[in-house]
Amino acid sequence: PRDGLLMKRGRDNGQFLSRRFVLSELEGTLNSSASSPPPFTQAKEPKAVIKVDTINATFQPEKIGNPNGLQITYLKDYSTRNMFIYHENGKEIVDWFNSIRAVQLHYLKVAFPGATDAEVNNAHGHLPLLMTARDRNDIYIGFNVCSDEVLEL
């Protein structure tokens, strides 16, 4: 599990505000909530609960206006949403990206226990497309993958 503060761009005013993010391998979710100072007491329900099988995370420094910018694209209520986050420390945002990918890989290994490591690793590269195609909501951001490739997995 990963837990920490990241700067998140507000949907309405575009300002970046500090938000607490919690990535749970056990629940397969990325949660965000209004930040509280350490030791991170959770007074309210999370503002967002995102299932990792719908996430596509990409580095987008130009779009976010920060060299450590990360765009999280995900599904909510059958529509595609975007969340823009950054951290002042480049290593920290890379660690978040890698943690998200690791939780997604764990999700695939649990969801497809009979798959070989090669099949899981191949599917891991196509995770956003693979997991959302099941619900007929494809996310193609950052991928040039045809549906035939997904069906071969």
Image: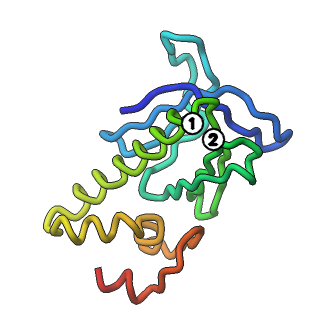
Compared to residue 116, the image places residue 76 above or below, namely above
Which percent across, then down, holds residue 28? Answer: 37, 45
Query: Would you say 138 lies left or right of 68 here?
Result: left
Amino acid type at circle 1 is Gly
Quarter of the picture holding the C terminus = bottom left
Q: Is residue 76 visible?
A: no
The alpha-carbon separation of the residues under discs 1 and 2 comes to 5 Å
What residue sits 41% from the left and 65% below the top? 127
Q: Is residue 15 visible?
A: yes
Disc 1 residue crowd, few under 14, some 14–19, many 20+, Cα 10 Å: few
Q: Which residue is mark 1?
A: 90
Q: Quadrant of residue 142?
A: bottom right
The disc at residue 26 is none
Q: Quadrant of residue 95?
A: top left
Q: In the image as oriented, which residue stretches furthest toward the right?
A: 13
Q: Quadrant of residue 147?
A: bottom left
Q: Earlier in the sequence, mark 1 or mark 2?
A: 2
Q: Which residue is mark 2?
A: 68
Which percent across, then down, holds residue 43? Answer: 55, 16
Which one is in front, 115 or 132? 115
What residue sits 23% from the left and 71% below the top? 119
What residue sits 36% from the left and 33% below the top? 1
Disc 2 residue crowd, few under 14, some 14–19, many 20+, Cα 10 Å: many
What residue sits 25% from the left and 66% below the top? 120
Give the structural element (helix, strand or loop) at label 2: loop
Amino acid type at circle 2 is Asn
Compared to residue 130, the image places residue 6 above or below, namely above
Which percent across, then down, holds residue 146? Answer: 47, 86
Verify CB contact (< 8 Å) between mark 1 and mark 2: yes
